[in-house]
Image (tube, rainbow, N blue to C red):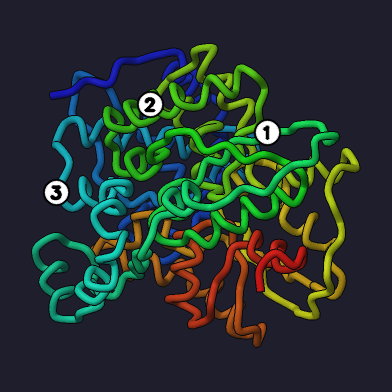
Amino acid sequence: MMIIPEDHIEQSLEASLDHCIKCNICTAACPVSAVTDLFPGPKYVGPQAQRFRHASQPSPDESVDYCSGCRVCNEVCPTGVRIAELNARARARLVAERGIPLRNRLISRSGLVGRLGAGPHAPIANALLGSKPLRMVIERTLGIAREAPLPAFSRYTFRSWFRRRRAPQIDAGTPKRQVVYFHGCSANYYEPWIGKAVVAVLEHNGFEVLLPRQRCCGLPLLSNGDFAAARRAHEENVAFLAPYALRTIPIVGASTSCTLTLKEEAPELLGMQSDTVRAVAQQTYDIFEFLRLLHMRGELRTDFRPIERTLPYHPPCQLRAHRIGRPALDVLELVPGLRLIETHASCCGIAGTYGLKVEKYRISMDVGAPLFETVRRSGADMALCDSETCRWQISHGAGVVARHPIEILAKAYGLVT
């Protein structure tokens, strides 16, 4: 049995227990406990149950696995108890005691799945995964819900496109500015057009885009309690990114889940606090966080074409966990004619791989129901969201196309049609 050693992060989490005043605000705000009795709420599973969790005895409950990790409890706690982190570490201890099911091993390895499915053979892979009989077999054998939204593999990877393309020439008299792009699994294997939009916007603003080696950020591994594999992933990413971070070259990502993992989730949950880990975290920005910073400095180009549209915008849980406000709204309000309406829904329900699991699919759809209804009531044929899994869930639940806000910004610049 793997034992997760106690570290200073664990000690700080333990200390935060004393700040719980048992007000139940977290339980009232929890989108999961509101739709199922299988999860009794953050207060019970988090600080209350934590007092009975010790390495020398089994986990006191099963319900921690029904925490989706949305972090709404952290947002609303008036005393700063780190409930989501307590639950994530409790899940990891449960996994250490009992092992990881094959289903969870598979869906948590986004990079491996992407490498297997993306490429010239993608149409075959997509046709197989779109087959209802095969999805029924997968549900019965692996426990992946037959109705759950699985993204379509791309015929090519973003990295292969980036290698083949011809980068624009920067004027000799222009100061050289560089930025590292952390594309994540989604842009590389499923949505390369988002990576293209990111590169186009950054280059339009005078940056040379660098693309070092990288692997999955590790968030699916963390969410499924596989802390050992997540640590290896983060160690590799730090090794790839640290040379740039130590030269204060910004690291920018359009997957708000990936950037939060590099900034905070991996270092905190895994207790990784070396100088290089901190350097990478400090130099990591979500794409619109970075663009808003450029605008505040007077460095963002604003040669936008009008876009006469009103669109619903959902800030996903992982973006709210950054505690940076709504940077996409701040930047896109500069586009003439464009009006974005924030949904104010608590969660879409998918929570990464959570809603793919057969025992949690219905919960995920019930959690996301208010968001789906808001999007449908807007009358728009498109919704915007910064998280890939949330976009797939919105399209699945609301029946509209969901796009990343960077695609709209690239269109406003005239960089895409």
Q: Earlier in the sequence, mark 2 or mark 1?
A: 1
Query: Which labelled disc corresponds to residue 178?
Result: 1
Place of residue 67 in the rendered image (x, y in percent of width and height, measured from the top left): 38, 49
Viewer-closest of 53 and 74: 74
Residue 28 visible in the shown view: no
Residue drawn 52% across and 16% down?
A: 276
Q: What amino acid is at disc 2? A: Glu
Name the mark nearer the viewer: 2 or 3: 2
| Residue that badge 3 annotates | 102
Reply above or below: 255 against 242.
below
2 vs 1, front mark: 1
> For the residues marked 2 and 1, what is the alpha-carbon distance in whole angstroms?
22 Å
* Callout 1 crowding tier (Cα within 10 Å): few <14, some 14–19, many ≥20: some
Answer with left or right where residue 402 lies relative to residue 289: left
Residue position for label 2: 236
Q: Up-down: is 101 above or below 179?
A: below
- Residue 382, position as x, y percentages in the image: 61, 78
Residue 136 visible in the shown view: yes
Lower sequence index among marks 2 and 3: 3
- Toward the viewer: 80 or 395? 395
Q: Position of residue 369 (x, y in %)?
A: 49, 74
Please state which amino acid type lies under the numbered disc 1: Gln
Residue 329 x %, y %: 75, 59
Which residue shows up at 62% across the image and 50% down it?
199
Q: Amino acid at mark 3?
A: Leu
Query: Rounded to the nearest whole Å, what is the CA distance between mark 2 and mark 3?
Result: 24 Å
- Residue placed most toward the observer, 62 or 159: 159
Q: Please tell me which of labels 3 and 1 falls first in the chain.
A: 3
SS for callout 3: helix
- Depth check, mark 3 against mark 1: the one in front is 1
